[in-house]
Image (cartoon, grey):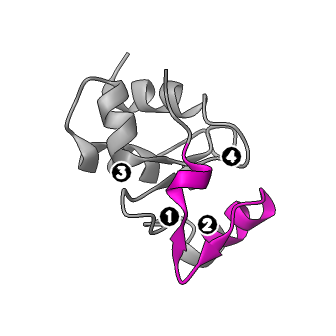
Amino acid sequence: MNFNEQCYTILRKVPKGKVTTYKAIAHALKSRAYRAVGNAMNKNPYAPKVPCHRVVKTNGETGGFASGAKKKISMLRKEGIEIKKGKINLDKYLYKFK
């Protein structure tokens, strides 16, 4: 399984109403390739079944999205995630991989 497919497998674990970070996915894969995770999310052929809109920056900012930032924010809000001043409270919404 290539790196992108491994990223998608990990991301499938993140439930509706939670987010993860590029860094957390990389760490779950025992990697430090955070940018490569972002690249995989940008090329996600399985959206929305593989919910790449749930991947955000480590500082809580929403980060990029192939369909645009407004669409990402809209999708996150529909799942009940609050975004205040462009940031998500990771203490409240971060999904922790086991």
* Span shown in magenta: 72-94
Task: Identify the residue at image location x=50%, y=64%.
Answer: 65
Disc 4 marks which amino acid? Pro
Q: Is residue 84 magenta?
A: yes
Q: Is residue 54 above or below residue 31?
A: below
Q: Is residue 83 above or below residue 28?
A: below
The front one of 14 and 49 is: 14
CA gap, disc 2 and disc 1: 6 Å
> Is the residue marked by circle 1 packed among few (<14), some (14-19), or many (20+) residues within 10 Å?
many
Q: Which mark is residue 38?
A: 3
CA gap, disc 4 and disc 3: 16 Å
Q: Could you say whether the residue bearing mark 4 is in a helix, strand or loop? A: loop
Which label's residue is closer to the chain start, 2 or 1? Answer: 1
The front one of 79 and 59 is: 59
Instruction: Point out residue 51 in the picture as x, y percentages from the top left corner.
Output: 62, 44
Mark toward the viewer: 4 or 2: 2
Task: Identify the residue at image location x=78%, y=59%.
Answer: 80
Which residue matches tag 1? 65
Which residue matches tag 2? 72
Disc 2 marks which amino acid? Lys
Identity of the residue furthest to the left in this view:
32
Which residue matches tag 4? 48
Instruction: Point out residue 54 in the picture as x, y percentages from the top left corner.
Output: 58, 51
**Residue 69 picture quarter:** bottom right
Task: Identify the residue at image location x=68%, y=46%.
Answer: 48
Do callouts 4 and 2 mark residues in contact (Cβ within 8 Å)?
A: no
